[in-house]
């Protein structure tokens, strides 16, 4: 049975992570805190889909996600508000650069929790380690690269113990073709295989469980002229050939190529519409 609440929660955190971590990805950083030139999402409005005549429209507002930035374009505040305007999340970020380290301090004003994240970079500006400290836990993430500069392994260590390992494989075109997750005893948990069209765009994503059983296939059907996905279908399997649900995601973009709307449906019924407003930092 498809869990709408779980997927909705996953969608929010996915967009949040893309918003924050795309800014700190070293593909876009030259001085470890150079966030210039990146479009900045300042608000995300999520609406419930309602059917009117033969089409679905935006109905009741579900929540509002807001972000604020400093003069360098770095996120300084993340807020999540309900449809009544009440905050359920408010996190404040501060930054400090020290040599090849970028220190990020976040404070959750609702739960009164603080965490300090230190990003370590090598001479070629690749992220090699992240240490996050909160009230009770120290989490360390280590990154390993091959000679071509591809990230091939990620280790997550909590209080000195490896709790998860991620390995990645690439083809001769440096395209990521496989990601596999392992638990604290090095047992496989999840695996994702990727294939590509001739133009280099991703065509399918296959997800397998620890027994190498196919769980889900995502078909990236259509892209626009800016190589952004317009539509995709997700097939969930019970056994190799039995499809238990089909989810369709439709994407719309603004004139700069940043997504402005996502419509999601399961077995033909629309259940979620996400609208994103974007402001550009100069």
Image: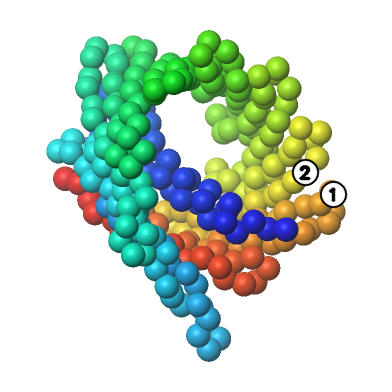
Q: Nearer the viewer, residue 104 or 236?
A: 104
Q: Is 35 left, or right, of 13 in this rendering?
A: left
Which residue lies at the image location 65% right of the left edge and 28% below the top edge? Answer: 181
How far apart, in angstroms, are the residues tagged by discs 1 and 2?
7 Å
In the image, residue 212 above or below residue 251: above
In the image, residue 265 above or below residue 169: below
Please tell me in which quadrant of the rendered image residue 243 appears. Answer: bottom right
Per the image, label 1 sits on a secondary structure element best described as loop
Q: Which residue is mark 1?
A: 239
Question: How many badges with numbers are in the image?
Answer: 2
Q: Nearer the viewer, residue 234 or 134?
A: 134
In the image, residue 1 above or below residue 161: below
Q: Are marks 1 and 2 in contact (CB under 8 Å)?
A: no
Which residue lies at the image location 65% right of the left edge and 48% below the top edge? Answer: 204
Q: Earlier in the sequence, mark 1 or mark 2?
A: 2
Task: State how the image is colored.
Answer: rainbow
Per the image, label 2 sits on a secondary structure element best described as strand
Q: Which residue is mark 2?
A: 214
Find residue 78 and report its horizontal and vertical position in percent. 31, 44
Q: Is residue 169 visible?
A: no
Q: Nearer the viewer, residue 136 or 263?
A: 136
């Amino acid at each position: 049975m498809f869990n709408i609440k779980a997927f909705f929660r996953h969608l929010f955190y996915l967009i949040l992570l893309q918003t924050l971590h795309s800014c700190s990805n070293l593909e876009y950083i030259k001085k470890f805190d150079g966030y210039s030139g990146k479009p900045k999402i300042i608000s995300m409005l999520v609406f419930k889909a309602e059917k009117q005549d033969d089409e679905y429209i935006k109905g009741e507002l579900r929540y509002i996600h807001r972000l604020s930035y400093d003069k360098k374009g770095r996120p300084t505040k993340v807020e999540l508000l309900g449809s009544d305007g009440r905050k359920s999340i408010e996190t404040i970020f501060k930054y400090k650069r020290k040599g090849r380290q970028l220190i990020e301090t976040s404070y959750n004003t609702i739960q009164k929790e603080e965490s300090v994240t230190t990003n370590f970079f090598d001479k070629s500006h690749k992220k090699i380690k992240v240490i996050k400290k909160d009230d009770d836990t120290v989490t360390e993430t280590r990154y390993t690269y091959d000679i071509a500069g591809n990230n091939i392994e990620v280790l997550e260590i909590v209080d000195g113990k490896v709790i998860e390992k991620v390995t990645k494989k690439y083809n001769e075109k440096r395209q990521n073709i496989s990601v596999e997750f392992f638990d604290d005893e090095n047992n496989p948990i999840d695996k994702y295989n990727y294939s590509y069209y001739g133009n280099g765009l991703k065509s399918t994503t296959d997800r397998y469980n620890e027994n190498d059983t196919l769980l889900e296939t995502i078909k990236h059907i259509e892209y626009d002229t800016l190589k952004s996905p317009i539509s995709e279908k997700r097939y969930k399997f019970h056994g190799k050939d039995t499809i238990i649900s089909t989810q369709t995601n439709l994407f719309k973009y603004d004139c700069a190529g940043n997504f402005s709307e996502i419509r999601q449906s399961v077995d033909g019924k629309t259940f979620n519409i996400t609208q994103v407003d974007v402001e550009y930092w100069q």
